[in-house]
Image (tube, rainbow, N blue to C red):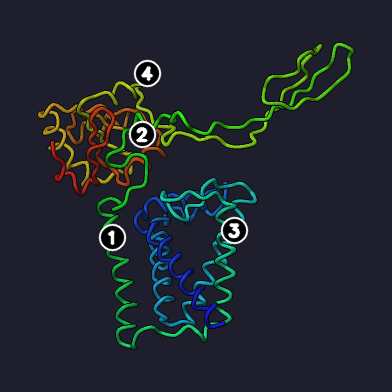
C-alpha cells in the first residue's frame, strides 16, 4: 500500500503542478474558459462571469500549490481533502460538459494540449481513483524535508506562483502556444498542409427505384447508380478532418475583406483591442507616440476591434490616433493577444513582435 500511495502521490502531484502551471502561464485565457462554463448555455451562473479572472488565478495557484504540497508531504490531511474536493468538482464539470455537449474544449491544459470533454472526463476519473487511494492511505504520505525547510518550501511555492501569475497578467504569457505567437506566419496558419487528414463523411440516400420501390443506400457520396427519384440525402461525419490553426481571422471594412492585402504588407503594426469600451486607458495613452514612430519608419498601422463605428471615431479623436480601425471577431482578438490593447508587428504576415500595452516602449521599429 505504501508503494502504491507513493506512486500515486508523484503522479497526481506532477500532473496538478503541470496542469496548473500551464493555466497559470495564461490566466486570462483560463478566465475566458470559465466564462464559457458560467454562461447561460452551460452552468447558467452568469453572475460569476465578472469574477472569472480572479477565480481563475485562485484556482490555478491552488492547483499548483496542492501539487507541490503533495509531493513534499506538507499537511497531508489538508492536501488530500483539498485534492479530493477539487477533483470531484472537476469530474462533475467535465461530465456535464461532455454529456450535454456544452463545451468543445475543457481547457484543462490551456492551449498547450486540447482535450475534448470526454477525454478530459476520463482523465479526471483516473485522477479521482488515484486521489481516493491517497485519501485511504494518507498515513503513508510522509514529509520529505525537515519541519522548517518543509514550511519554507511550501510558502515559497505559493509566493512564486503569485509572482508568476502577476507577471503574466502585467505582460503576456511567457510561453505562447497559440497560432499568433512570435515567429508564426498567419497566412500559413490559415491553410491546411497537403498531408492534412480529410473528414470521412457517410451519405445516406433514400430513393425510389424505377419500379417504384423505396430503398436506402449508404456510401461516400456517389449515390445510387440508377433511380427514379431521390427522396432525401442525410450525411454523418464518421471521422473529423484536420482544420487550419487559424480559422476565423479576418480584417474587414464596412464593404470588403482586406485580410490578404494587409498580410502582404512588408511592415505592418496591428493595434488589437477586442473591446474599445473595456480597453485600458493607460494603454491607449501610450499608443500615440508608438504609432507616430512606426509610421515615421515606414510601417502601416491599423487597429482591430469588435467595437462599433461610433466608439472607433471617439477613440481616434480622444487619443489623437491617425489609425483606421477595422472589424474582427471579438473571440479571435482575445486569442491573438492577452491584453487590451495589445500590439503586434508583422512582416508579410509573420509576427515579429508582440507586446502587452505595458511593454509598448519595448517595440523596435
The residue at 21%/31% (across/down) is 317
The first of marks 1 and 4 along the sequence is 1
As drawn, is 30 to the left or to the right of 134? left
Q: In the image, is residue 85 above or below residue 185?
A: below
- Residue 237 position by quadrant: top right
Q: Where is residue 339 in the image (x, y as percent from the top left)?
A: 30, 46
The first of marks 2 and 4 along the sequence is 4
Sort mark 3 into few (<14), some (14-19) or many (20+) by Cα contacts within 10 Å: some
The residue at 31%/39% (across/down) is 273
Residue 161 appears in the figure:
yes
Which secondary structure, mark 4?
loop
| Mark 3, residue position | 122
The first of marks 3 and 2 along the sequence is 3
Q: How far apart are marks 3 and 2 (CA)?
A: 40 Å
| Mark 2, residue position | 307
Residue furthest toward the bottom? 147
In this view, the residue in front, 96 or 5, is 5
The first of marks 3 and 4 along the sequence is 3
In this view, the residue in front, 252 or 232, is 232
Amino acid at each position: 500500500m505504501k508503494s502504491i500511495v507513493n506512486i500515486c502521490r508523484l503522479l497526481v502531484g506532477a500532473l496538478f503542478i503541470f496542469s496548473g502551471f500551464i493555466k497559470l502561464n495564461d490566466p486570462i485565457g483560463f478566465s475566458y474558459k470559465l466564462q464559457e462554463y458560467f454562461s447561460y448555455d452551460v452552468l447558467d451562473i452568469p453572475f460569476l462571469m465578472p469574477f472569472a479572472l480572479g477565480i481563475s488565478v485562485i484556482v490555478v495557484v491552488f492547483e499548483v500549490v496542492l501539487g507541490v504540497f503533495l509531493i513534499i508531504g506538507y499537511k497531508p490531511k489538508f492536501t488530500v481533502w483539498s485534492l479530493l474536493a477539487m477533483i470531484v468538482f472537476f469530474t462533475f464539470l467535465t461530465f456535464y460538459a461532455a454529456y450535454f455537449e456544452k463545451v468543445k474544449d475543457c481547457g484543462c491544459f490551456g492551449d498547450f494540449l486540447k482535450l475534448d470533454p470526454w477525454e478530459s472526463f476520463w482523465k479526471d476519473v483516473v485522477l479521482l481513483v488515484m486521489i481516493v487511494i491517497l485519501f485511504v492511505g494518507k498515513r503513508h504520505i510522509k514529509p520529505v524535508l525537515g519541519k522548517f525547510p518543509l514550511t519554507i518550501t511550501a510558502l515559497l511555492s505559493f509566493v512564486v506562483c503569485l509572482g508568476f501569475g502577476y507577471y503574466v497578467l502585467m505582460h503576456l504569457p511567457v510561453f505562447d502556444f497559440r497560432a499568433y505567437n512570435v515567429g508564426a506566419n498567419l497566412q500559413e496558419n490559415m491553410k491546411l498542409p497537403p498531408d492534412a487528414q480529410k473528414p470521412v463523411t457517410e451519405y445516406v440516400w433514400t430513393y425510389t427505384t424505377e419500379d417504384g420501390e423505396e430503398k436506402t443506400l449508404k456510401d461516400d457520396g456517389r449515390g445510387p447508380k440508377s433511380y427514379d427519384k431521390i427522396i432525401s440525402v442525410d450525411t454523418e461525419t464518421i471521422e473529423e478532418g484536420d482544420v487550419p490553426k487559424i480559422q476565423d481571422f479576418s480584417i474587414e471594412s464596412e464593404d470588403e475583406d482586406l485580410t490578404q492585402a494587409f498580410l502582404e504588407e512588408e511592415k505592418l503594426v496591428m493595434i488589437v483591442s477586442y473591446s474599445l469600451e473595456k480597453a485600458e486607458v493607460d494603454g491607449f495613452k501610450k499608443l500615440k507616440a508608438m504609432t507616430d514612430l512606426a509610421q515615421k519608419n515606414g510601417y502601416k498601422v491599423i487597429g482591430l476591434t469588435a467595437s462599433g463605428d461610433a466608439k472607433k471615431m471617439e477613440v481616434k479623436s480622444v487619443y489623437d490616433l491617425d489609425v483606421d480601425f477595422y472589424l474582427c471577431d471579438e473571440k479571435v482578438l482575445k486569442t491573438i493577444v492577452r491584453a487590451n490593447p495589445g500590439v503586434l508587428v508583422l512582416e508579410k504576415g509573420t509576427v515579429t513582435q508582440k507586446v502587452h500595452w505595458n511593454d509598448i516602449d519595448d517595440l523596435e521599429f
